[in-house]
Amino acid sequence: MKYDVVILGAGAAGLFCAIEAAKRGRKVAVIDHAKRLGGKILMSGGGRCNFTNMYTAPENFLGQNPHFCKSALSRYTQWDFIELVNTYNIVHHEKTLGQLFCDNTAKDIVDMLLAECAKVQVNIVNRTQFNGVSANDVGYTVSTSKGDFACESFVVATGGLSMPKLGASPVGYRIAEQFGIPIIPTRAALVPFTLHDHDKNILSELSGISVDASATCNGTQFDENILFTHRGLSGPAVLQISSYWLPGNTVSFDLAPQIKLNDTLVQAQKDNPNMHLSNALGSIYPKRMLQTILPHFQIQNKPLKQYTQSQIQQVLSAFSNWEVIPNGTEGYRTAEVTLGGVDTDFLSSKTMECKQNKGLYFIGEVVDVTGWLGGYNFQWAWSSGWVAGQVV
């Protein structure tokens, strides 16, 4: 079966690249092992797909070469994708911090991509096992359970290792290594923390409680909220900072980033000196949290009049600089994305083509470009797929 372009992976990046290539008149086949296409799109954003972020900029991405993503993001922007979404009359809203979600369902985005593929006659070959690829004089031969595909351009859009239940695998990294392209070591990112037993045994009592917080690690800070779980800590601030955390690092949490806790306590001490500390803090934190966290912070719950100014400062310090050394993370099972991947020093930032292997491309999550939480990784999929689609 002869094609101009064969793309391995029918996720966000792969489908978008296929659409753009086929618009140029290229004969395109997309190969995927899954029965259901766009699985990660369908489950993202709680089933509503956080498809981009209005504030997307290169600063929102991590990678060994932080400049690599600039070209693709500037040539196909969030506004370009929003325009496409609008042409399909997909109703959407900004949830917070520029994050755009479908009003109805993530299926709207998958249906849009499949409709675009149908318009330009992209051949999607799903339920197909990839067996290997080899280079030849005119391009590549891709071996699958449904036969061999010959092509001039071969695009790897296989994603990372996150969420293996959706079929994630290291196949993209193996292809890169086969052609002499190094892999930047990978790890789970945008992922909940697990805690050591001595912390988990106490804090698991708070499972389900969410509070506003600021999380800081290795000089980076995120202000959103954290969620206590039965195994550790989650929530947007935790997921964000997990991308910057390494085993053994301390994460600092300010549990009152927007609240003048000092003023609250000083005023309460003046107005209601017989009030217990837990009641004074009850307007800020859930009662169940205070019952657990005060003993954990080794703070006595007594009438406010019994606290000296230095003891009030100790309370403030405990809440504003709570230091945690996570035991680890939940791993790829729940990670939203994979950090690391195909070394961008070996790729063209303008086309995503391998510098040493003409006609071989890597796009999307398989590449060492990882976005923040909030639609940035989808935008990288659209942008990297688009630039490759202009040239494959």
Image (tube, grey):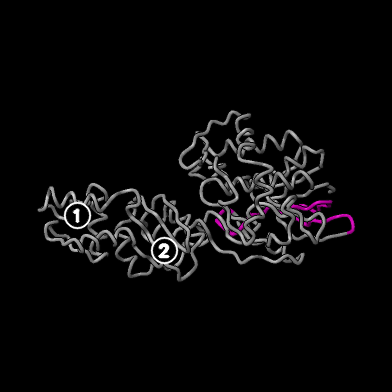
Mark 2, Cα crowd under 10 Å, few <14 / some 14-19 / many 20+, is: many
Boundaries of the magenta span: 137-166
Amino acid at circle 2: Val
Q: Residue at x 45, y 58 (%)?
A: 192
Q: Residue at x 37, y 57 (%)?
A: 229
Mark 1, Cα crowd under 10 Å, few <14 / some 14-19 / many 20+, is: many
The span from disc 1 to disc 2 (Cα, nearest Å) is 25 Å
Q: Residue furthest right?
A: 137
Residue 285 x %, y % = 27, 50
Numbered tag placed on residue 251 in the rendering: 2
The numbered mark, 1 or 2, whose residue comes first in the sequence reads 2
Residue 263 x %, y % = 24, 50
Residue 138 is a magenta residue: yes
Residue 104 x %, y % = 51, 34
Front residue of this view, candidates 304 and 47: 304
Q: Residue at x 27, y 55 (%)?
A: 289
Residue 57 showing in the rendered view? yes
